[in-house]
């Protein structure tokens, strides 16, 4: 079985490598960035099974929604999931899926698998 490709945007420098590693050892191929501006170029360079946008705090919702809308406009079939806490999840509805970050690595991987259609 081919490894599914995940594009992971996480602006928390200390958390991004941990989540990338969890996804990688769980069988995903992961490309990641700290910068939202990198996402369009990365999407132009290859196909991803899932774009995972890590939203840390309510102040990041507008950026995530703009990016999600841009992705959906340019690539309507692209699956997008937000990783956020429960409060942030109640304030947005752009993403195809919302993975809650009351952090449990097994639940995180399960949510990514479901969102990526695996």
Image: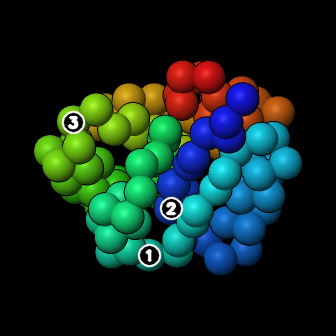
Drawn side of residue 105 relative to residue 117, left or right = right
Q: Residue 60 location, x and y as percent?
A: 38, 61
Give residue 93's quadrant in the image. Answer: top left
Q: Which residue is mark 2?
A: 9
Q: Is residue 73 above or below residue 109?
A: below
Q: Is residue 108 above or below residue 66?
A: above
**In this rendering, the label closer to the viewer, 3 or 1:** 3
**C-beta proximity under 8 Å, tags 3 and 1:** no
**How many other residues sit within 10 Å of disc 2, few (<14), some (14-19) or many (≥20)?**
many
Residue located 61% across and 39% down the image: 4
Q: Upstream in the sequence, badge 1 or badge 2?
A: 2
Residue located 62% across and 22% down the image: 118
Marks 3/1: CA distance? 22 Å
**C-beta proximity under 8 Å, tags 1 and 2:** yes
Q: Which residue is mark 1?
A: 35
Q: Is residue 62 above or below residue 115?
A: below
**Which numbered circle lies on residue 76?**
3
Q: Residue 53 location, x and y as percent?
A: 47, 52
Q: Front-most of 93 and 88? A: 93
Drawn side of residue 85 relative to residue 97, left or right = right
Give residue 90's quadrant in the image. Answer: top left
Residue located 17% across and 49% down the image: 74
**How many other residues sit within 10 Å of disc 1, few (<14), some (14-19) or many (≥20)?**
few
Q: Secondary structure at mark 1?
A: loop
Residue 78 in sight here? yes
Q: Upstream in the sequence, badge 3 or badge 1?
A: 1
Q: Secondary structure at mark 3?
A: loop
């Amino acid at each position: 079985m081919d490894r599914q490709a995940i594009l992971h945007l996480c602006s928390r420098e200390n958390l991004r490598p941990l989540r990338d590693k969890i996804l990688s050892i769980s069988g995903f191929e992961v490309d990641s960035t700290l910068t939202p501006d990198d996402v369009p170029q990365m999407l132009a360079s290859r196909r991803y099974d899932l774009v995972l946008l890590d939203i840390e705090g309510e102040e990041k919702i507008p950026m995530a929604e703009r990016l999600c809308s841009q992705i959906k406009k340019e690539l309507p079939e692209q699956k997008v999931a937000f990783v956020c806490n429960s409060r942030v999840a109640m304030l947005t509805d752009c993403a195809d899926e919302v993975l809650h970050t009351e952090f449990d690595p097994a639940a995180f991987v399960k949510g990514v698998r479901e969102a990526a259609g695996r």
